[in-house]
Image (cartoon, rainbow, N blue to C red):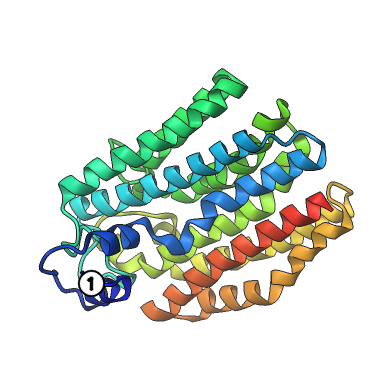
Amino acid sequence: MATVSEGAGRLAAGLRPRGAPAASAWWIAARPQTLTAGAAPVLLGTALAAAEGHVRAGLALAAVAAALLLQIGTNFANDLFDFERGADTKERRGPARAVATGLLAPSQMRVATGVAFGGAALAGATLVWAGGWPFALLGALAVACGLAYTTGPFPLAYHGLGDAAVFVFFGVVAVAGSYAVQAQAISARALLVSLPPACLVTAILAVNNLRDIETDAQAGKRTLAVRIGPVATRIYLASLFVLAYGGLVALVGAGVLGPAALAALGTLPFGLRAAHDAVVCRDGPGLNRALVRTARTHAAFTLLLAAGALA
């Protein structure tokens, strides 16, 4: 059986492998380098609840599981439906996708997508039990958006709404929702604190869409990057980093967060490197590096912010 690196090498070469290496294929399809985007905001919301004495470990674990499975399901659906819509081709500059390269059959990915979203719903049932119908509504909307990102009569990514969906569900809802289910209350503070990491998690998608701007345009996938063009997308990307770090300083200055939260500024050198690569690089490998660096910056920033909230 091929290793993960060998499977990735085949994908990069654009070759259709003989006999899909199951473990490697699923690992690649899950896009592990960005999975922290689902878990880190939930941990931040949990830290905000813990700082007020409201932490409930079981609910926190259920929220992390639901977020990770929701993200994996969305990644699987994106892999499948972008292939079916012709958005993933051999000209794609990012890592080739599992279905497009034959590592996994569309039928396999369709089943896996259902399993992942089903698992997210199962984990979310615990949150619904604890928080009531508002969390049932949020969960249904999250699953619907995960599926509607690249499929259905109005796929969000194809109409330039992917960034907004990520900002809301992997930013604001992940932080404020995980706080609310444990504290049993909606918090204006949690909503405000969610905004800086929401900017950075949106930047992950923005880098991805900047890298794929040409092939997406050819396939009729009119992401926000396609709609505003590469120059405006780079300005938008830089703005997301500025808003994240500037927002953190503003929240501390306004007393919403304590001075310990400024520890998240320790990620600034990494954020500047990620933003620089995203703005300057024009080639696929360079933008792929920018994508990974942006994901790591978001994870480190969010976790340090969580630690600062607990201090």
Quarter of image, res 132:
top right
Q: Position of residue 180 (x, y in %)?
A: 68, 31
* Foreground of the two, 153 or 83: 83
Residue that label 1 marks: 2
Q: Residue farthest to the top?
A: 133
Quarter of image, res 131:
top right
Q: Position of residue 139 (x, y in %)?
A: 49, 30
Left or right: residue 87 compared with residue 48: left
Q: Residue at x 43, y 30 (%)?
A: 122
Please indicate, yes or no, whether residue 172 appears anywhere in the rendered image: yes
Q: Which residue type carries mark 1?
A: Ala
Please indicate, yes or no, whether residue 243 appears anywhere in the rendered image: no
Relative to 303, say whether 94 is above or below: below
Q: Residue farthest to the front?
A: 1
Left or right: residue 290 compared with residue 266: left
Q: Total label count?
A: 1
Q: Residue at x 73, y 30 (%)?
A: 183
SS class, disc 1 = loop
Quarter of image, res 266:
bottom right
Q: Position of residue 144 (x, y in %)?
A: 39, 34
Left or right: residue 5 compared with residue 262: left
* Foreground of the two, 154 or 168: 168
Relative to 122, say whether 5 is above or below: below
The quadrant the N terminus occupies is: bottom left
Q: Residue at x 70, y 40 (%)?
A: 191
Crowd class of label 1 (few under 14; some 14 to 19; many from 20; radius 10 Å): some
Q: Position of residue 164 (x, y in %)?
A: 51, 46
